[in-house]
Image (cartoon, rainbow, N blue to C red):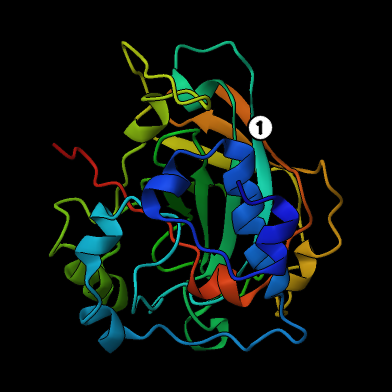
Amino acid sequence: MVSTAELIAQDFTPSPVEYRNWSVERKLNFIWSRIAASEYEDLPPFQPIDVLGLLFTPLRKKMDDRVDESPAGWRKAIHAHGTVAQVEYVSTGDHPYTGLWQGATGLVRLSVTGDPAKRGFAPGLALKMLVAGQDSANFSALYTLNGQGQDHNFFAHPLSNIVPVVNEFGPKLINGIFRRVSRYPTKLSLQDFGMFDRSGAAITSPNSPEQISLVPELQFASNPHDFRTDFTPLPVGTKIFTVMVSDSGQVIGNLVTKSPFVASAYGDRQLFFRHHRFRDA
């Protein structure tokens, strides 16, 4: 068995089956060693949305590949640059939702859809919770498809796995591209989070909310700036979001950092977050 130190010291890549069977801690150490080793010395500039690249992206892989590292040749045409931290989802315990909703460990990536100077500030979140001996559970969340204008406060608004349809050219174009692989391009399913607990044990009667809201616990400056620099100083143990069921307003947990935030080449190019189709069969 390769130790965490060896993971950092050498270019070790496990087979998909070997990786899947690892513990949560081992998977997290493996991914984080890659992130830490590729941290940027200078933050790269934000890129505009690559609409043409998105058009030719094999989006079915985004929906169907149950992996934590990008498939060969994968390139982010949207949300190209962000910052990543290890996180703990701490459940209140006072709710009916099963599996990882009772507590989980993983990674959060915070990003913007494209260069804010080109289309305004549009924050987004991707969450990956790791499961021992099973595939990870993933979802992404936005405020709206067209963002929040020139307000550069990443925490200005709650984020959600379901966002309203926007009747504007840009969002309609992006939705049209994603509609090739999903009937509900503005909605992502949370079902995977209820299927297994963090130890990999299957849940007999899984139960997940249909929609959650991630309510910010912090506030940053609204003036134009690189949002990634806001997250660098946050100490380990910072509560960044309260997790709330959208239709009832019930708080079911909190998202708390377990590491500093790091902007890295691995986090931008190779860390992969699956989009689970809403009402997938």
Residue at (36, 86) in percent of width and height: 50
Q: Quadrant of the C terminus?
A: top left
> Residue 137: where, in percent of width, then height?
42, 40
Rendered view: 7 above or below 90: below
Residue that label 1 marks? 254
Q: Is residue 153 visible?
A: no
Q: How many marks?
A: 1
Q: Which of the 4 image quarters holds residue 82?
A: bottom right
Disc 1 residue type (three-letter): Asn
Q: Is residue 259 visible?
A: yes
The reply, left or right, for residue 259 in relation to residue 99 is right
Rendered view: 92 above or below 129: above
> Residue 221: where, in percent of width, then height?
78, 67
Residue at (37, 16) in percent of width and height: 203
The reply, left or right, for residue 232 in relation to residue 196 is right
Q: Which type of secondary structure does the marked residue at label 1 adopt?
A: strand
**Which residue is nearer to you in this view: 146 or 129?**
129
Q: Which of the 4 image quarters holds residue 216?
A: top right
**Which residue is nearer to you in this view: 74 or 123?**
74
The reply, left or right, for residue 163 in relation to residue 84 is left
> Residue 31: where, in percent of width, then height?
59, 57
- How crowded pointer 1 is (Cα within 10 Å; few <14, some 14-19, many 20+) is rated as many
Residue at (44, 17) in percent of width and height: 98
